[in-house]
Image (tube, helix red, strand yellow):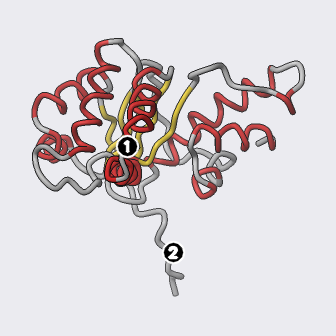
Amino acid sequence: MRDRTRFLLGQIGLSPRELEGVDLEPIHQITDRPAGFGVVGTPGVGKTFLLVRRIGQIVEGLVADHHLPAQAKLPFGFARWRNWPDMAEDLKSWVAQDWTADVADLVEELSSCRDLYLDDLGQERIAKADDYSLGLLRLILDNRYRSNLPVFWTSNLAPVELNRVYGARTASRIFSAWPPVALKGPDLRLPRRAVS
């Protein structure tokens, strides 16, 4: 991966740990769906890695095709990557500090960017049915649903569990517009034991 690609992916929102996966060989092969899709499965099976590789290859292609790759820029509103549990906590903190303009700007950005990547849906802390971050997630997803914009998402939860967390209406929109693909396999983050 080029340095410029790494920089641009960081601007989209990928963390240094997530960036480590861009150059690795793929673990799972699935048919890409540019209209958006989800990836569900047990922890450590490679869900986030699959989406990191997807966005990484797209950005690397844009950089490689630029007449000055070291100065390549992404189109305005190209894509955003967010770890949703972290983002949910940030949003609650911003509201507590009365940063409502920042919240509104972020909701607009995530609602209108070309491609939205949401990692770890269903893992955020939801205090009650009218939880603030849950309301914002619903607003973002509803805006994207109505505008036919793609969402690429991951979750450790099965669809029935996501239905319980987010409610039938939101879950139905997620599953119909951006249907999940189930990944199976061992937890790849756990070290392998040597066989004697």
Whole-angstrom CA distance, mark 1 to mark 2, is 23 Å
Which residue corresponds to the image point at 18% horizontal and 47% vertical from the top-left? Answer: 131
Residue found at the very far front of the displayed protein: 98
- In this view, the residue in front, 55 or 181, is 55
Callout 2 crowding tier (Cα within 10 Å): few <14, some 14–19, many ≥20: few
- Residue 149: percent from left, percent from top: 40, 17
Is label 1 in a helix, a strand or a loop? strand
**Labelled disc at residue 191:** 2
Circle 2: residue type: Pro
Which residue corresponds to the image point at 47% horizontal and 20% vertical from the top-left? Answer: 34
Circle 1: residue type: Thr
- Residue 159: percent from left, percent from top: 19, 41
Which residue corresponds to the image point at 17% horizontal and 27% vertical from the top-left? Answer: 172
Q: Quadrant of residue 99?
A: top left
Number of marks in the rendered image: 2
Callout 1 crowding tier (Cα within 10 Å): few <14, some 14–19, many ≥20: many
Viewer-nearest of discs 1 and 2: 1
Residue found at the very far right of the displayed protein: 68
Q: Quadrant of residue 186?
A: bottom left
- In this view, the residue in front, 103 or 49, is 103
Q: Which residue is mark 1?
A: 154
Residue found at the very far top of the displayed protein: 147
Q: Is residue 104 above or below residue 124?
A: above
